[in-house]
Image (spheres, helix red, strand yellow):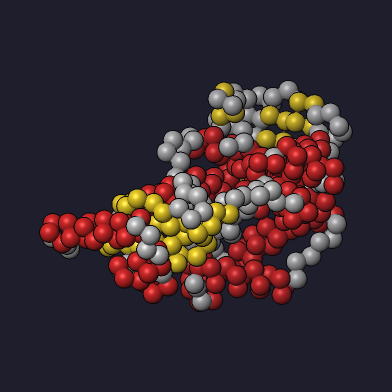
Amino acid sequence: MTLWKTFINLVLFSTLFLFWGGTGAQAKVLDRVVAKVNNEIITLSALDERARVDMARYSGMGIEALPPFEQVRLQTLEQMIDEILMIGVAERLNMIVEESQMQSALDDIRARGNLTEEQLAEMLEQEGRTMEEYKKRIREQILLSRVINLEVRSRIKISKEDIAAFYDAHRKDFWTTPKVHARHILFILDNSLTQDEVELKKKKARMALEEIQSGRDFVDVAKEYSEDVTASNGGDLGVLEKGKMISEFEDAAFSLKSGQVSNIITSPYGLHIIKVDEVLHGAPIPMEEVEGRIEAQLKHERFESVFKEYIEDLRARSFIEKRLGSLKLSGEKIKSRWLRVKCLGRQCTKWKPLR
């Protein structure tokens, strides 16, 4: 996962985590500054707390080979730098989170966690956190979302020509799903039946099929023989969409033409005789009906590159100083204590490491 995708997922598409990893006591012990961003600092304790939460997210995603903690910590540092820069944008734009908005966010978090106010406060206390600290983090998340909507999403423009070009290039994806109007006669088989009972049902299925093949109406045969709840309706299953049935039944049903009857089909439910009353072939969906879908997909695809461009520009106009120490960068250990990157114009100039 790229740094940009990771950041986007953490800020936009994930819920606010109740627990930030670690405890308040641990945070007070480790207070080495690992980065300065304009007038703000990032401490090692704050970095490690966030990195542990990010590591837990990776675990929750079911990834077998988890990245090394050092790698996650470095990615987290970059994310924290970007967050500080965007919070700065929010402050310069005088963005305010009203108390009612904060309360709404808290109510949503409690509802998703099925927590009372007292339970939430107790959990925060167990983590060594106060409600004010938690509210501060929620406020930051709301501001980050607003900045991204204002500064990034607003830059993504999708034209009618873009939509038409996508539609033309992906016409095969814009077809209605094939359907059939089908009936069936079912003889239920399960583990409770003896072998003799199974054989008797197979015999009845053959008798029913022979009667249909001899010209008797399928509806009448279904009413007499079928053990399904649809028997009284002549086995009518209604219109069935491809891809939403058990494979044995679907393969047989969609191999038939209108008016045809299948042989005896075995499925996990038992023995079926299927009749297709009508085949409804797939048809192209008019572009007008899928314009919204296409526009949303194109915006989603372009979001990452526009976000990356925005962050790079924001960094280029900011002062960022990293004190990396023994942290690894791209697999290499930084031997110097400081690495300075001065970004006061469009070009970033790396300063010589301090000894």
Q: Residue furthest front?
A: 214
Front residue of this view, candidates 287 and 218: 218
Front residue of this view, candidates 4 and 183: 183
**Residue 50 in view of the camera:** yes
User: Where 187 falls versus 304 (above or below)?
Assistant: below
Q: Which residue is drawn at 21% across and 57% down?
A: 203
From the image, which quarter does the C terminus lie in? top right
User: Where 137 falls versus 328 (above or below)?
Assistant: below
Left or right: where does residue 343 sit relative to residue 5?
Answer: right
Q: Residue at x 71, y 71 (%)?
A: 101
Front residue of this view, candidates 160 and 241: 241
From the image, which quarter does the N terminus lie in? top right
Q: Which residue is drawn at 80% across and 26% down?
A: 349
Q: Position of residue 314 (x, y in %)?
A: 80, 41
Left or right: where does residue 222 sit relative to residue 62?
Answer: left
Q: Residue at x 30, y 56 (%)?
A: 210
**Residue 151 in view of the camera:** no
Q: Position of residue 198 (x, y in %)?
A: 18, 58
Q: Where is residue 189 in the image (x, y as percent from the top left)?
A: 24, 60
Front residue of this view, candidates 211 and 223: 211
Q: Position of residue 128 (x, y in %)?
A: 50, 62
